[in-house]
Image: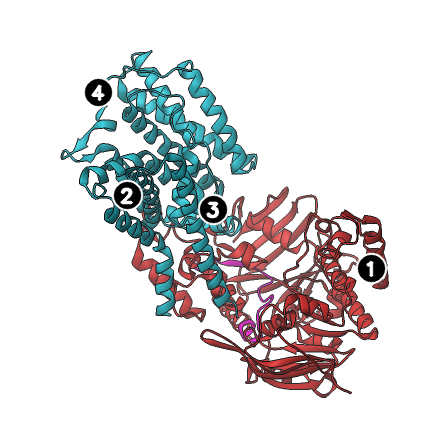
Amino acid sequence: MSPLLKLDHITKRYPGVTALNNVTVSFEQGEVHALLGENGAGKSTLIKILAGAVAPDEGSISMEGEPLENITPALSVKMGIGVIYQEFTLVPTLTVAENMFLGKERRNGIFLNKKTMTEKAREVLGELDVEIDPSVPVKQLSVAYQQIVEISKALAGDVRVLVMDEPTAPLTNAEVDSLFRLVRKLREKGVTIIFISHRMEEIFQIADRVTVLRDGKYIRTLPIGQTNAPELISLMVGRSIDEQYPAREARIGETILEVQNLCAGNFIKNVSFSVRAGEIVGLSGLIGAGRTELVRAIYGADPLTSGEILLCGKAVSLKTPARSIAQGVALLPESRKEQGLVLGMSIADNLMMSTVKKLSRWIFLKKAQCTRLAADYIGQLRIKTPSPAVKVVNLSGGNQQKVVIGKFLAASPRLIFFDEPTRGIDVGAKHEIYQLMNRLVSQGKAIVMISSELPEILGMSDRILVMHEGRLAATLDREEATQERIMQFASGNLGAS
Amino acid sequence: MKESKMKINLRQYAISGVLLLLVIFFSVTQKSFLRLDNLMNVLRQISVMGIVAVGSTFVLLSGGLDLSVGSLLAVTGTLTASLMVNFHMPPIPAALLGICASMILGALCGLLVQFLTLPPMIATLGMMTSARGAAYLITGGLPIYDLPEDIKFLGKGTVFGVVPVPVIIMLVCFLLGWVFLETTYLGKNFYALGGNPEAARLAGIPIGLYRVTTYIISGFACGIGGIVLLYRVNSGQPGAAMGMEMEVITSCVLGGVSLNGGEGKISCVLIGCLVVGLLSNGLTIMQVNEYWQQVFTGMVLILAVCIDRITKIQRVKKAKK
């Protein structure tokens, strides 16, 4: 049987970099095929070629043996290739049904036939067993539901190949489960799914075969049953990373942060916990459990309603981020592009952002000190760049994340909140960030890490706090914590004691 | 990497190229163009606009927009004129009060934008209309003549007999603006605010304060411009500087300031002002009628922004792998 979709000797060059180098891959009908590779391995380029967004310099694409020449976005859609990007392409103000039929509206003459569209939308959603009202504006839906709408939108056309670029990144575990049910259902219908994820365990859950790319080159395709995570990691990085989570010797000291009966908004209720020097405290929970909200309230990014915050035993008022920074508290925000970086500014300017005042005499910047600071952090964090004057928009995700980290480290904090520090970055950069966190706690700093990846929480934390619906559901020691136990508390199956 | 650095510089200074081309074109075709008095004339003509553009650069860089500048000039001019002529106040306190009024109105816009989260366009559009009305109310609808002569040099004077005082004032404003934006940490914070307000806030920058300050700076620049204009036309005109906001925005955008905030250089804004001034002067010497001049000025703006967009699109294409 010939494959449904075949990429034959594809090469794509950009000035200065060969994004894909003579790559040949084929996708069978009705399989879930995972694409694996570090950032910059060429996965995105491959997707763009399939979507018709960029044309390959060499090589050919064929569908059921028929060559597709001069592939354009329109042709790609016509051939039944649907792509779900990391950034959604939904119009927030339009309804679910309107979004699903965007560009292919059902009409009576010039008038929209809303009824038919709504019914058809309900039908598609029904087939997927999801309960979403098609007449609701998309902006009222959660991220997970928006993604389902995105998938349904692709299915509203006649999709034979569905490409999903990191679909699970914004989802909680429960949501990932329902997404996977959806994926399996599609597979049964004979849809080919090309699945991209950085999360190894997901690939073993869902994929039938896995193809590894590295530096634009095809490395190998393996049936999932004949491989394991360490092998895939070493194929991806070209070397073996002995331990995904580097070990450290915990030297736990004085209490740095103590939070008492904190309430914020009408959601965070009566949260009390403490963090000690040299300690990494993992903050786990489902999305929407209030982890980010809690941390932002402590940091002064959002107002808190009541409760006390003590830093090194002294009650402090951290009403604004500026005060927190002055008190030695830092927050690495959840979304680096929206909250962490000024993308149009240089690496140096971003690194200086929270410390510019200290780098100035009266109001005038001390140029030499600014340059030194930038050079320091670029070296210390191993940010890969030819010059500190490069705009951060041109960096890869991992390097961007390092810039955000550098910016907050420059203010020499004693307590750092990391909110999803490794989201959407590749294995190598993840490892570096883990090592950095270890180095920081060994210097006596305290870390609170929010993560939706349970292995990361288990691998890095000395203690684990689990949140459920705005409350602290449990505090677990490293030894007693398991994925199952955390999930039970996070989903509210075990009541708070 | 050296190559790409050069390209960035080229893009930044594309406007200088436009300026150079204009100068060459007009000097070749028009004999009187390159004469010193004509060049000084150009500078004098753009001086008020330039002063205002310095203030607007702060607002635009921080992601705002100020449409009220023309009306603020009129309020400053009429208020100062009225205080001097009708209330016999000495010129300097009168001028200072005029400038203060303009700054207060600017602050009001800033507060509306910051605390009631009005879109800058709406807040300053409202201010544009109301302040214009206020200017007419101050003078009772008529111009105020017979200004005291004491500070007439602000509009009419020259230094060394050739350089008009308004030009000096404009250059000083640009210099101050440059020092502020390029060499102080406050300047960096304005850029950060315009580039990504949330990231700036989380980095500990009090963005509300900075945002309101930009409108006060704009009001201050309008105040200075208003006094200069008052003495250039030698009367308090309630209808003065009508439509100035568009000229100012044109100059800033020509100078590469992004209307989305966070990007642009004040030195290039000066060049943008020069382009607008030279174009109008050169076309006038060529005896192109004023309606055609408007057509050309509009086209230059669109063309300059198109070039900018095209280079940007290419850069983005290259950056994406």
Horizontal arrangement in the rendering, residue A407 relative to residue A126 (left or right): left
Callout 2: chain = B
Residue at mark 2:
B175
Region in magenta: A410-431
Residue A302 horizontal/vertical position (percent): 59, 46
As measured in the structure, the alpha-carbon distance from the residue carrying label 1 to the one carrying label 2 is 62 Å
Callout 4: chain = B
As measured in the structure, the alpha-carbon distance from the residue carrying label 1 to the one carrying label 4 is 79 Å
Q: Image quarter for residue A177?
A: bottom right
The amino acid type of the residue labelled 1 equals Leu
The amino acid type of the residue labelled 3 equals Leu
Residue at mark 1:
A125
Residue at mark 3:
B259
Callout 3: chain = B
Callout 1: chain = A
Q: Work out whether mark 4 precedes mark 3 in sequence or the reverse, and give the earlier one.
A: 4
Name the colour assigned to chain B in the rendering. Answer: cyan
As measured in the structure, the alpha-carbon distance from the residue carrying label 4 to the one carrying label 3 is 40 Å
Horizontal arrangement in the rendering, residue A459 relative to residue A318 (left or right): right
